[in-house]
Image: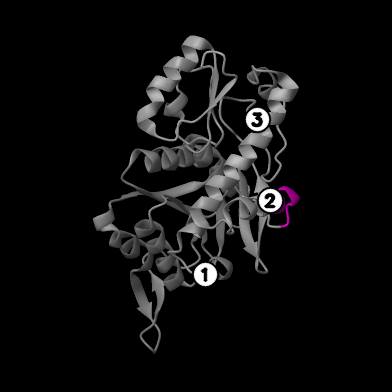
Amino acid sequence: MRNTDLIIGPLLREDNAQIQEFSIANKVNVVNPLTNDLEMVKGNPFGFLFQPSYEKLGEKSAQYLANDPQHGKKKCLVFYGANVRDSVLAWNFIRKAEELGVKVILKQEVFKEESNKITAVLATPTEFDEYKAPIQFTIPKDSIGAIFVASEDPMIYTKVVSAVETRKDNTLIIGSESWMDNGSIDLMKFQRMNFVFYAPNYVSSANAYYQDFTQRFIKEHGRAPSSLSLSYARIGYELMLVLGHALKKYGVYIQNGLATEVQPGFQMQGFDFRGGNYNQSVPFVKFSNGSLDVIATY
């Protein structure tokens, strides 16, 4: 193990401390392929996250909103779950958004058993039409520019989506690419409503490397990859391409090269380790005319 050039993992948190200790003691680089938690490599100059950190996802989402000429100048609301991941994501968004001049008027932590609070905030009617349908709300229609939902919990983000549907305005909802894989929301809603997703693992179906990966997967397993297995397998395939080329180009201590150059993606949009030991490149995607496309990268 001391002669290992690179360790991939761990996938389980309970194995992490021992592997990080080994990595530091023996100066062996270790790359975690799936987590966004910087604590997993904290204090280890040989430890890397292949994904952006929660902190960076929040910051880059704030940058995206601040640069949106239509929605960035209006009021913004933030909803997040009662766990560390959501709190880190939300408060880094809030800090950066306020720094960039975005008006964050509500910062709401939501417990699962209190998810109806979201509806109360967004969709409490104050006026009705002749058919008793709500036409105005406590937070007036079209006064909200965007809602940042710092959670992958369907109990939280589906409530936001439902409330915005009730409002029938042009509120922008910013959330995670994982929502599209969960199945809790009909894909037609993603196309019909105003969604933007931070999507570090986005891959175009037209990408030649992705098509090659799919063919290899089918040949190996006798079926097409689907849902979570597709995401994990695709990330692993990309990781081996990116790190394999980095090892060839820079040698065993890849950090010497990663710190100076952006690494091109093969299936994905690219990787930037120049400012730290985690990927700092975050694409944002949106449905347009039935196609999911990258609209910005920060």
Q: Residue 90 at what x, y percent from top left?
A: 43, 43
Q: How crowded is mark 1: few (under 14 residues within 10 Å), some or many (20 or more)?
A: few
Q: Which mark is residue 243?
A: 3
Q: What residue type is labelled 2?
A: Tyr
Which residue is depicted at the point 56% across and 25% down?
Answer: 277
Q: What element carries label 1?
A: helix
Q: Which mark is residue 189?
A: 1
Distance between mark 1 and mark 2 Cα atoms: 26 Å
Where is 267 relative to 49, above or below?
below
Which residue is depicted at the point 62% across and 41% down?
Answer: 237
Where is 182 relative to 127, above or below?
above
Q: Which amino acid does label 1 sit on?
A: Lys
Residue 210: in magenta span: yes
Q: Are marks 3 and 1 in contact (CB under 8 Å)?
A: no
Tell me: 56 left or right of 239.
left
Q: Do the residues labelled 3 and 2 touch (CB within 8 Å)?
A: no
Q: Residue 82 at what x, y percent from top left?
A: 31, 45
Would residue 225 be visible to someone looking at this image? yes
Distance between mark 3 and mark 2 Cα atoms: 17 Å
Where is 112 relative to 237, above or below?
below
Most distant residue in the left direction: 113
Residue 249: in magenta span: no
Residue named by callout 2: 210
Q: What element carries label 2?
A: helix
Where is 160 relative to 239, above or below?
below
| Rendering quarter of residue 15 | top left
Q: What residue type is labelled 3?
A: Leu
